[in-house]
Image (spheres, rainbow, N blue to C red):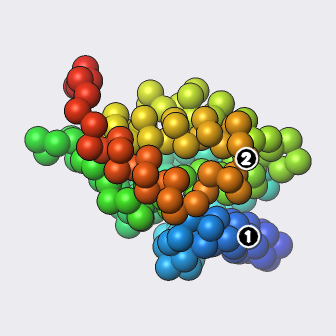
Amino acid sequence: MKLKNIILHFNTITKHRWLVFRLCVRAGIPWRGLVHDLSKYSPTEFWEGVKYYQGNRSPIFACVEDKGYSEARLHHHGRNKHHPQYWYDEYSRIKEPIIPYKYMAEMICDQIAASKTYKGKDWTKYSNLVYWLNTEEYVHLNPKLKDMIREILGRISNEGVNKVIKPKILKEAYYRHISEEKEYEHK
Ligand SMILES: [Zn+2]
């Protein structure tokens, strides 16, 4: 366990939280920004992150390659409501429920911050939409909420983050999508 990696991993978490906090303030959910990802400082999540510290990608991927699973990820998803995995329950009648608004807004802020961190100067306003379109089919999330995310990230790729991450825009999109009657092929 290298001392250097302890410092680097601590900095990565703190930098990410600061970026998310600033976005959450814009989105009108400052408290969510303040408490975002605090479980990353818990021993289960923190020490795995130090051991598999990468710099350019999440240590979780390195841990999964090595061990086949990540206790940090399981711990994180079980405790943080801004992750679709927190809400997914394969044994329930509604496997992918409608997630409350504040966690959806936090989820979008988290996606933007993570993409900015890992892409660095290669990040553009299109990055989040491209990544989402490539991965959304693997995400267990209510289709109405997927539609909301697609719309918001699509608007960001046209108008930029600052024009779209606003309480009025996010709330309007959320409540419009969850109240729409739509036919989905549902599993
Ligand atoms: Zn998180």
Q: Quadrant of the N terminus?
A: bottom right
Where residue 48 appears, as percent x and y from the top left, is 59, 63
Q: 98 and 157: which one is in front?
A: 157
Q: 125 and 68: which one is in front?
A: 125
Where residue 62 appears, as percent x and y from the top left, is 64, 47
Q: Earlier in the sequence, mark 1 or mark 2?
A: 1
Is the residue 69 above or below the residue 9 in the image?
above
Number of residues whose C-alpha sits closer than 10 Å to that of mark 1, classed few (under 14), some (14–19) or many (20 or more): some
Badge 2 is on which residue? 160
Tell me which residue sits at (42%, 61%) in the image: 103
Hey, which quadrant is residue 185 in on the image? Answer: top left
| Left or right position of 27 against 89 | right
- Residue type at mark 1? Lys
Tell me which residue sits at (50%, 79%) in the image: 31
The label shown at residue 72 is: none
Is the residue 14 above or below the residue 107 in the image?
below
| Left or right position of 124 against 46 | right
Number of residue marks = 2
* Outermost residue to the right: 121
Task: Kindly report the distance in space between the C-alpha atoms of the residues bearing marks 1 and 2.
Answer: 21 Å
The label shown at residue 15 is: 1
| Left or right position of 155 against 151 | right
Judge whether residue 127 can be spotted in this image: no
- Residue type at mark 2? Gly
Q: Is label 1 in a helix, a strand or a loop?
A: helix
Where residue 96 appears, as percent x and y from the top left, is 26, 43
In this rendering, the label closer to the viewer, 1 or 2: 2
Q: Is label 2 in a helix, a strand or a loop?
A: loop
Is the residue 65 above or below the residue 75 in the image?
above
Tell me which residue sits at (42%, 37%) in the image: 146
